[in-house]
Amino acid sequence: MSEHFDVHGGARLVGEVGVVGAKNSVLKLMAAALLAEGTTTITNCPQILDVPLMADVLRSVGCAVSIDGDTVRITTPTALSHRADSPAMGKLRASVCVLGPLVGRLKRAVVALPGGDAIGSRPLDMHQNGLRKLGATSSIEHGCVVAKADHLRGAQIWLDFPSVGATENILMAAVLAEGTTVIDNAAREPEITDICTMLTRMGAHIEGAGTSTLTVRGVDELHAVEHRVIGDRIVGATWAFAAAMTRGDITVRGVNPHHLELVLEKLRLAGAEVTTFDGDGFRVVQPDRPRSVDFVTLPYPGFATDLQPFAVALSSVSDGTSMITENVYEARFRFIEEMVRLGADARTDGHHAVVRGVERLSSAPVWASDIRAGAGLVLAGLCADGVTEVWDVFHIDRGYPHFVENLNRLGARIERVATDPTRA
């Protein structure tokens, strides 16, 4: 069965919505469970498709994994397999984060190359180079990353770009290496801080979480713990943009507003009234048509590339002309092709896009190319005349729990429609 969403235009979203654990954190925390024998319990997990996929990856190396609502329990045995080649590896990018834990604990790994969103090339060079600095060999063979080491020893590692995935893999290998590792130009995302918090509770020695320099003093072993995932700032920001685009009034709970300071400031510039609640959420009220604002994607604390589709969608219905610059993933502007189907006035030139806002978009069939593009198209459909069909919605299900239900509670009218292709 193929599924799409029918999105009825004209809704003004009003109400309160809760945000659960971060997709970009929980999958890496699940991988970190490989570092310690015993049962690791992770709570506040989002009920999204990627969590059972990562569970399958962990089962492929010998773990027992149970998922009960928002709680995931991972029992890691003494004897792990070093081969992570589950079919699930080809369906999500985060699966590559088992590489660091396997090399750290077993001193060898064969990890199938990951899949995930179609947003451009994301090579593993920095992951491999970091492991080599720690004393491992690493190469790509027959569609897998193959790494092995006699010993892992601490090293000074400079990342050419503050890659989240490379930072995580190197960090998870270094916590069990001999001596001290310093990772310079490390990623600073809140999800990195979250994994550092969990690793520290497991017995790791890490300094500098949330800064561009991580110092790791290796230990002999780690132990299993219980950990609560931080709130998903990308999902929280999605609801913030939804309020601004539909001239709505949405209160978001369960996410730290300090993780979204730049996003909320951009929405203030667009004319929104923004109120923050200490550590637990925020409210966005958009009384009038939003004003045009420029956006530039950069690593955290800059404007997240994951939010670029929402910046484009907001600009498409704003008063004025916006410039959006994409500095992280070159293929993210594929989203604009679908926005043009909806009547957006947008042009791209290299890694820049110029968007001239229109009063109203027009409905059309559109296709999601990744998680955030899919959600962005749904929000755009709410600002279009008629009914917009959004296809390939499995992408959205990978990142947003109960997306349709939450939107309908806020006042939208969206239906999930299943189609049997054999009856076409």
Image: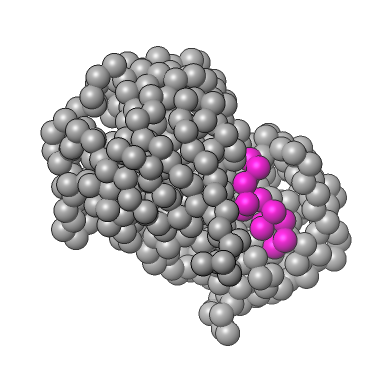
Q: Nearer the viewer, residue 383 or 306?
A: 383
Please say whether residue 159 is visible from this viewpoint: no
Residue 102 image-quadrant placement = bottom right
Q: Which residues are magenta?
A: 46-57
Q: Is residue 264 placed above or below 301 in the rendered structure? A: above
Residue 238 image-quadrant placement = top left
In the rendered image, residue 118, in percent from the top left (x then y), is placed at 42, 62
Query: As drawn, is 23 to the left or to the right of 228?
Result: left
Q: Is residue 320 placed above or below 346 in the rendered structure? A: above
- Rendered residue at 19%/33% (across/down): 359
Query: As drawn, is 352 to the left or to the right of 405?
Result: left
- Rendered residue at 54%/38% (across/down): 403
- Rendered residue at 42%/55% (across/down): 368
- Rendered residue at 49%/25% (across/down): 410
Q: Which residue is outermost to the bottom?
A: 142
- The quarter in which the N terminus is drawn is bottom right
